[in-house]
Image (cartoon, rainbow, N blue to C red):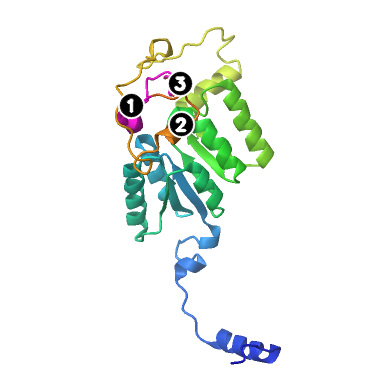
Amino acid sequence: MDNTMNRRDFLSSAAAAFAAPMIVPASVLGRGGAVAPSERITAAGIGIHGRGFHDLRWMIGNKDVQVLAICDVWKQQRLAVKEFVDEFYGNTDCAMYRDIREFLAERDDIDAVLIATGDHWHAQASVRAMRAGKDVYTEKPSTMTIAEGQAVVETAKRYGRVYQTGTQRLSEANHVFAIEMALTGRLGKVHTAYAHIAPWDAAKMPRTFKPAQTEPPKDEVDWDIWLGPCPWRPFNIEYVKGGWRGDYDFHTSCIGE
């Protein structure tokens, strides 16, 4: 069989195709209030638990956002987030990843990421994502240390990425007003500032380990990735469930919240 096609054959078949009636859903064209796929921000979630679920619900509710993937070291949470996203869109397209490195290496189609891991992963995940060409929204605190903060700022500048951290209260009207009062001198010379740090006082946070438990298979919980940049310690599922708060290695205390 001759599979070649000359220019005349091509033009004839192309003309026939364009002459045929085409039914295109309004959503593809961006009509009826829908956003055309080409105009949507493709997004993914990294470490979506508690507060992260609140952020994800807000994100997925925006018509110009399409959530395509979830990355989490805990299989139970990966499945829960996938179920939520798939149910929202009415499909089974949300991809799951355990390893952030694998996710960033494979998904060139993702524009932005929502990072809601434990505090100790915020800087690492943000820098890795921006180097991979993603814009970033991360939960507070942006980093654990000043050096990490400098690395995040430098990375955002070098790679031309949009970076935002969710210190939501600074965007509330009363806080904006108070900041404006201080910066414009309407409060006079500001000489003292008080910060509320309860219930997690950094000076009182424990440095002891939770009781050691048998470490599960990596597909169930990847403990090494969960620890990330922190010193090794024995596995305990309570850390993964959110019990890292109030622990010196993982948490900045309320001054970072």
Quarter where residue 54 is shown? top left
Mark 3 and mark 1 in contact? Answer it, CB < 8 Å: no
Q: Amino acid at mark 3?
A: Thr
Point out which mark residue 39 bears.
none
Q: Earlier in the sequence, mark 3 or mark 1?
A: 1
Q: Quadrant of the C terminus?
A: top left
- Mark yes or no: residue 232 visible: yes
Question: Image point 40% across, 34% down: which residue?
Answer: 223
Seen from the viewer's position, the closer of residues 54 and 4 is 4
Q: CA distance from mark 3 to mark 1?
A: 14 Å
Label 3, on which residue? 252
Q: Point out the tag, 2 or 3, that comes first from the N-terminus.
A: 2
Question: Which image quadrant for residue 240?
Answer: top left
Q: Is residue 58 magenta-colored?
A: no
Q: Magenta span: helix, strand or loop, mainly?
A: loop
Nearer-N-terminus badge (1/2)? 2
Q: Which residues are magenta?
A: 234-253
**Position of 250 relative to 2 (above/below):** above
Identity, as a three-letter code, of the amino acid under mark 2: Gln
**Local secondary structure at mark 2:** helix
Pointer 1: residues within 10 angstroms few (<14), some, or many (20+)? some
Q: How many marks?
A: 3
**Cα distance between the residues tagged 2 and 3:** 17 Å
Query: Height in image: 129 above or below 62?
Result: above
User: Which residue is disc 2 drawn over?
Assistant: 168
Q: Image check: 62 left or right of 186?
A: left
Q: Secondary structure at mark 1?
A: helix
Q: Residue 5 vs residue 256: left or right?
A: right
